[in-house]
Structure formats: C-alpha cells, structure tokens
Amino acid sequence: MHTSGFRRRRAAGTLPAATALVTALLATVVPAAPAAAAELAPRVDLTVLVVDDGGGAVEAIASELKGSGTPYRTVRLTDPARPVIDAAFLADTVDGRPRAKYQGVVLPDEAPQGLAAAERAALTAYEQKYAVPQVDAYTWAHPGVGLDHTSEGGSSGVLDGVRTDVTAAGRTGPFRYLDGPLTFEDNDPDVAESYGYAGRPREGYTSYLDMPVAGGGRASLVGQYAHDGRRELVVTFAYNQHQRQFRALARGIVEWLTDGVHLGQNRNYLSVHVDDVFAPDARWDTARNCTPGDIDCVGGGDGGESTPPIRMTRADAQYAAQWQRSAGFTLDMVYNAGSGEEWRTEHGGSDPLTAQLLADRAQYRWINHTYTHPFLGCVQDTSTVPWSCAKDAYGNTRYMSRAEIAAQIRDNHTWAVNRGVAVDRAELVTGEHSGLRTLPQQPADNPNLAGALADTGVRWIASDNSRDPRQRPVGAARTVPRHPMNVYYNVGTAAEMADEYNWIYTSKEDGGSGACETNPASTCLDEPLDVTTGYASYIVPQEARIALGHVLGNDPRPHYVHQSNMAEDRLLYPVLDRILTDYRGLFADNTPLVNPRHRDAGTELARRADWDKALADGRVTAYRIGDTVTVKAPAGVTAPVTAPEGTRKNLLLGTAAFGTGYAGARSAWTAPEALQSAVTLTLPTT
C-alpha cells in the first residue's frame, strides 16, 4: 500500500518536502541539461595590417607607425609572392580562443584593384566579426565612402594654402590634440603640392576635418564612415609623409586605427643647443666669399684677416634670458670655458658676457663643449686643401692622445662646477663633433676617444645628424645625433647670412659658387636673395618649416646653432619665434612641446633602437582581450605603450595609473615588475 501510493504521488507530479528540497539544491550546482559553452572573448593582437600599393599615402601612414614604434605587417600588392589575404591569414585560434591577428587595416583606398574580390570579402567579414577599423589612405568623394560627389556642393582641386578646420567631432575624438586651423602647405607658388576632393557627408559619415566650399556650407576631407557593421576612416586628399598637414594628422589617424590602444608612443620634441658659448666665432668675408681662418680662405690684399669675430655681449645675454621667460622655452648652453678665459685675458681681465651668463646660470641648461674647442680627431695637416690627417714616420695616422682629450673634457667640467653651474658630466659635445669619424679625411673615430670618454664619465656624445644620423656606440658611450640649423655659425647680421646663403645656393651664372649645380642633394635658387630682406622673407620661414617638420615627426634629436646667432642681429630668435608660434597655433594645451636635455634625447633613441630590434626579431607579443592589454618583451627591453585616459597598470600589490598624459592619451616606456613576466593594463570601461 505504501509503495503503490508513493508511485501514484510521483505520477501526479508531487514529491515529499525533503526530496523537493534536495532536488532544488542540486539544481543550483549541476544544470538540469548541458548548456552551450559561452564563446570566449577574442584576442586581438596589437599589430596593424598595411596593404601597400606603392603610393605615397600608404607609405606616409607606414612611416608614422614605424616612427612611433607601432608594429605592422606589410602586404605589397605588386609582389607576385605576396600572401593571399583570406580568413586563415587574418584570424586563427590560440589556446582555444579566437585570435584576430590585426587590430587595424590600412588600405590604399576602399577597394584596391590589386586585391581580388575574395580577398576584399575576407577583409569585410573579418572587420565585421572583430570590430576592426579600416583606413582608406586616399580616395575620392563618392557615395561608396559616405560622401556626395564633389559636383553635389563639394569641391575638388589644388589645396595649397587652403585653410581647413578640425570639426567638433574631431576635437573630441581622434584629433583632440589639435586646436587651431590646419593650413595646407604652399612652399612653392609655381608647384601644385596637394590635391583633394571635399565632399558633403551622407548618412553614417562623421566629418573630422572640413573646409568651406563655394555656395556656402562645408565639405569634408577626413571623416569616419560607419556602415555594414564596419568603420572606415576616409581621407580624400593626397599627401606624403613630409607634408605638414599629414604630420599634424598622423597621430590621430593611428589613434583612430587602433581605437587608442597600441604599442608605440609619439611626442613633439624641440631642443636647441647653442654651441661655442663664451668663445668668439669667425666672420664670413662677403668680399672673398669665405671665412678667414679656414685653410681655403686666401688672397684679398690684407687677407681680410681683420674682420672682427662675432661674440655675444652682456646685452645679448640679458636678451636671451628675457626671451626664454617670455617664450616659455629653455635653451642648452654648450660652453667653452677656456675660450672665454682667453678672451677675458686679452681684454684687460674683464668679460661682462661671462658675468651675465653666470648670473643667469640657473635659467639655462649647460653642456660641456671642451675647454678650448680643439679638434679632437687626427692631427690635421693643413698644407693641403682640403686638409688631411698627418702621418708618423711609419705611415700611421697621428691622433690627439687620450690624456689630451680627457683634459679638455675634465677642465671644462671643473670650471663649471667651481662656478655653481649645473652640468652633467655624462653629456658632451665636442668641437665640430671632432674625435668622431670625419669623412673623407678621417673614416674612423679617434681610437683614443672612447677611452677618454670612459675616463671622464661621458655617456652621451653629440654627432652631426647630417653626416652621422644613426645613434651608435663609442666605447661605452652612445652618440646623440643633432640637426644642424641652416643659420650659419660665421654670420652676425641678416645681410651676411643672405650673402653666404647666396654663395652656396646660387649658380655660377648668378654669382654663386655653383655648388648647388654639382651637388645632387642640393638645388639652386631661381635668383639670388636680396641681402637686405632675404633672411626674413625666405630663410626664416624655410628653416622654421624644416625644424617644425622634425618636431612633428616624433624626432627627439636636438637642433644646434651657435652663440653668434644670438649676437648682433640675433638671427636665431625669428626662427624660434616662428616655430613656437606655428606650433602653439595648431596644437591644444594637452600637447605641449617636449624639451628634452641631451641625455634624455640619447636615452629615447637608445630605447627605440632596442625596441625596434625586438620587433624585428619577433620577440614581442602584445594583445588585447576585452579590457585587458598584455605586453611581453625580452628582458631588458622596455615597451612603448599608448592607451586611453583612465588606463591602469596592474601591479603585484594592486594597480596604479598608467603612463603620462599627452595629446589626450596616456603613454610611457614600461616594463613588468620583478617576478612578473608581462605588463598588463586594464582599460577604462567605455
């Protein structure tokens, strides 16, 4: 009876209370039926795919990736052995997790002819599945990229000198570091330098850079086109990697392409070294077109040897300090104390210039330039033109000794320390960059140089970027290449500067040296500059443009001029004022100029070299899974990483704010803590 009754109750769907309770508890632990496993969030590798058609636009974007240390893989459409871009090329599975091999895609345009239809379809599916953005490096305005044709209220044509503006969406988005108008370069009125198509946006298109068009309204040159579950950054003007308009936008293009999370970092650097401080500089002879004291400067009656040297005065030093304060910029004084002492002795024991500079010493940075500025390389034989390296009786090259080099470095350092000048013994600029190889006469470094640097604690020695552009070791020290500014050491006035410039850059027919005709790296002026106006009207804007190009190119290499450029007509300041004005008129306050000292520029270049080698060797692994970024690099190699504001670095005992704020993002050279194998970051929740 009890058994049959129990069975009847089960059939009716009822259970004793105790049995029901056990069943309910078990249900919370073991599902009643197997459920489908949740799909793992994909791993997205921090690498960019660049599909290259050989055009200047793709090359420009690739140069920005390379310069900032952002890894990318190039597929060249003209290479018959190139890989096929299919699903397997773009994605796979790692440790059971789906992996997207590329975080962004750069194409020449929205539908490159060199890609097969199946490859374009594979890219579309990949971008849709993994939310991977695509840059169309250069295309025309048409509905296929979210724009009206230019005939429908837009504009097409040469853009030289045209003012464009970053839109509100651009300033709050990928171009949040830009503040003012962006005017397209117009360096030669006789040459068309940039062409573009400005189209009116359609549905799904958000304009980031636009311009006014005839008939009213504005049309876009750069913007995002969101459609079919994908995002494209559409650029409708032609450019190359050197043009200012691209350099200003390049950072934002990469930020958009990577959603603001990528390896590499970018800064806008400007440092200016003023060489020969305390020493006089020789003056250009406008009659003989040479500099007295140079071995090739001969003839001319009295020889012109009486042309007075150029040296700053006390008033020039006072002006320099005042200019720094008003400009908000610090100069590096590269000094020769012994030369100043010689000047003081020759002038009755008085030197107001040195007294003023020492009174203002805390306002500058100071770098050792050797005591009396001698040539630290081979012993020069000046009996020939050009000079040659002297030989001993056995035919061996004679060099300045290790002891003599060390004395020049040590005596200059000691002089500064004894006068309360803050100087870092690890930093050195030799006179004329001597001691380092000097082609063609001295093809190798002075073999005594590395030892002398070690004896005096020098770790960073300047080199001339125009002759020795790559950082390299000199014993335990490393070089810091410097950009020479084309404001000459041997001129004190604008007229002298224009006169020498004419001599170098005009043809023989126009009264110049003709060097511009025979040097393949040079071009001649159409006609000589007016010596009274040429410096201000031509040389200043040109030199400012070149230097600003370095600044916008993420280049930490210092620029160098000479103390003569701060004397008499004070030729340096118009160039610097133009650079600073143009820069600050374009960039927002969140993107200040970075003004590194000598050692910091050297350290930055050294880190980049180590990083680039690690990338080239395939020893870096970096990826994003959801809101977590993981970076693994070889021991001793720090990784440059950029991430959004609010990102935190995961530590053994908690987290800390990641990096330094710059251009609306956070970035830093970063390495894992001890006992950790990788750097991990937590991105802010969006």
Image (spheres, grey):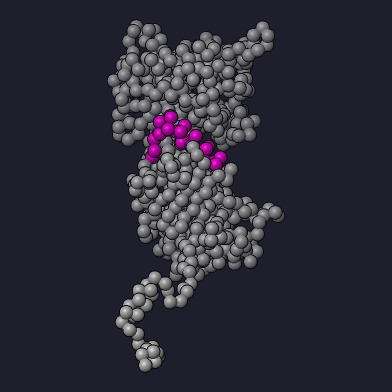
- Front in this rendered view, residue 636 or 239: 636
Residue 155 at x, y percent in the picture: 49, 61
Residue 538 at x, y percent in the picture: 47, 36
Q: Which image quarter: residue 271?
A: top left
Q: Can residue 562 be seen in this view?
A: no
Image: magenta residue range: 593-614
Question: Quick one: quadrant of the C terminus?
Answer: bottom left
- Front in this rendered view, residue 148 or 453: 453
Residue 450 at x, y percent in the picture: 53, 20
- Front in this rendered view, residue 147 or 44: 44
Secondary structure character of the magenta stretch overall: helix
Is 24 drawn above or below residue 530 in the view shown? below
- Front in this rendered view, residue 680 or 610: 680
Q: Is residue 228 visible?
A: yes
Q: Residue at x 54, y 24 (%)?
A: 475
* Residue 440 drawn in magenta: no
Is 567 drawn above or below residue 99 in the view shown? above
Question: Quick one: quadrant of the N terminus?
Answer: bottom left
